[in-house]
Amino acid sequence: MTSATAEASHPVTVEKKFMQQVMVNTPGETHLEMCIQCGSCGGSCPSAAEMDHTPRSLIALIRAGNFEEVLSSNTPWYCVSCYYCTVRCPQEIHITDVMYTLKRMAVHAGIKDPCAAPDFSKTFVSWVENYGRAFELGLMSMFRLRHDPLGVLRITDMAVGMVSKGRMDLAPKSIKGLKSLKAIIARAKALEVVA
Amino acid sequence: MKYGYFPGCSLERNAAAYDKSARAVAEPLGMEFVEVEDWNCCGATEYISLNLLASYALSARNLAQAVRTDGLGELVAPCSACYLNLTKCDKSMRESPSLAAKVNEALAAGGLSYKPGSMRVRHLLDVIVNDIGFEALRAKVTRPLTGLKVAPFYGCFVARPGYVQFDDTEFPVTLDRLLQALGAEVVDFPLKAQCCGGHMTQISEGMGLEMIRRLVKTADDRGADLIVTICPMCQLNLDAFQGAMNRHFGLNLHVPVLYFTQMMGLAFGLDQAALGIGSELVSSRAALAAIGATPEGEAGGPPKRVKKDDKALPMPAPLVRA
């Protein structure tokens, strides 16, 4: 299904424009307009208690066109990607994928980070883009030092345990085809359009 | 049977025990793994949070490399996150020709291309349960896990969202049946398909540790000697963060977390070192002593050899229940 079909059945109004943007930016068929506000998503969500808005409320806000409140909400960033809401939604809305879309839209719009999660994603991705592989020690130490320096102490024994068991690399590893990977990523970013 | 093999970043280091044990049990089961050449990170749940097309391109590069490496058309991923991303990429490209064209335009910058649907991505659990089967597994068991109580833990991505569906989204059973085939007693573990918390220990520590507490505490309450997992992220959370969780909640839980391939290797009578047992932070030594498995190396029963120069007091032989 395409945005064209969505637009044909729902003429664009100010309120609907934001909802359609979200749907256009989400791969596959996602009918946010079909949400019946049953709350199965929030009831299934392991992190709902910590969210600014439950997934159900967030969908209501999207439909109301309240993009500022939606994009500055911590809800998408507290989504743990368990896909319970997605498989339980009676309207088959791909809620988890919508959460990913909202994160990308928030970063693209330059919204102030509502929590530490966007920086965690950025730090993770920077290792992947520079080496082609994830680097856990680098990710955890850089991220912790920026956001929770004292928290480093609380995980020191864990980190020591991991290193002593040979479960943590002390330096990042690079793939052989790094140049080609970087070219692929650069082209993909140039092609990416966030509506 | 020959398969393409996608280890992923976790299996290279923090989950090396999973990699080691998967390769160790492949041989007796007649499986051959051909590792994808120069694979890259799948992006976990982080890349897609920032860039959609680049995250698909990352997975598509892996699929293209897999086609180039083995040309067999079947790719096995032991890591649930890699499995999710590879299947998500292939499915999205199959469903949307315009997306597939864009992904291929990006791949072309690196001299690659991928035809959607040309690689069938499968989780290691799927392959072992459906290609090998429980009967063939049973036939390989030389040291049944009799008397060992285990809590099977699936986590999210093998059960959901089900881009490739081989088990139930709410109440999966394949791992339960596999562990029963090995002779273990599977405890009723209602949280078996719940989330381990993913990266939440880093974002909101209290919440992440609470998700871990629920799982470890419930497994313990149900009488499990061990939690058995199929995913490196789940293993990392439940094992490496178990100490931090205990401190946070003032608890003293001790539930070791091993991979299903390690349990298979134990039942096949393989050496513990060859299965990476001992690299878990919550030691499984006491739990495994119940089946007569000790790290010193023995096969099919209690230790047969006593060190001659052992000056320590004699210890009773480990309890073996028939």
Image (tube, rainbow, N blue to C red):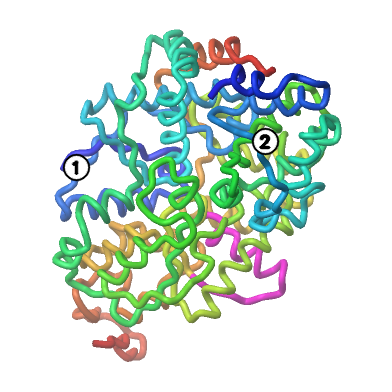
Residue B159 percent across, percent down from the top left: 45, 52
Residue A157 percent across, percent down from the top left: 63, 58
Which image quadrant: the C terminus of chain A? top right
- At a point 59% along the width and 49% down the height, the residue shown is A90
Is A102 placed left or right of A170 in the picture?
right
Residue B266 percent across, percent down from the top left: 27, 66
Q: For residue B253: magenta? A: yes
Query: Can you identify the residue that label 1 sits on?
Result: B32
Secondary structure of residue under mark 2: helix
Provide the residue span drawn in magenta: B235-255
The answer to which of B129 and B237 lies nearer the viewer is B129
Residue B117 percent across, percent down from the top left: 33, 27
* Label 2 neighbour load within 10 Å: few <14, some 14-19, many 20+: many
- At a point 30% along the width and 64% down the height, the residue shown is B178
Q: Could you tell me how far apart the alpha carbons at marks 1 and 2 are, in whole angstroms?
A: 45 Å
Query: Can you identify the residue that label 2 sits on?
Result: A32
Q: Are marks 1 and 2 in contact (CB under 8 Å)?
A: no
**Where B28 sits versus B38, above or below?**
below
**Where B66 sits versus B22, above or below?**
above
For disc 1, the chain is B
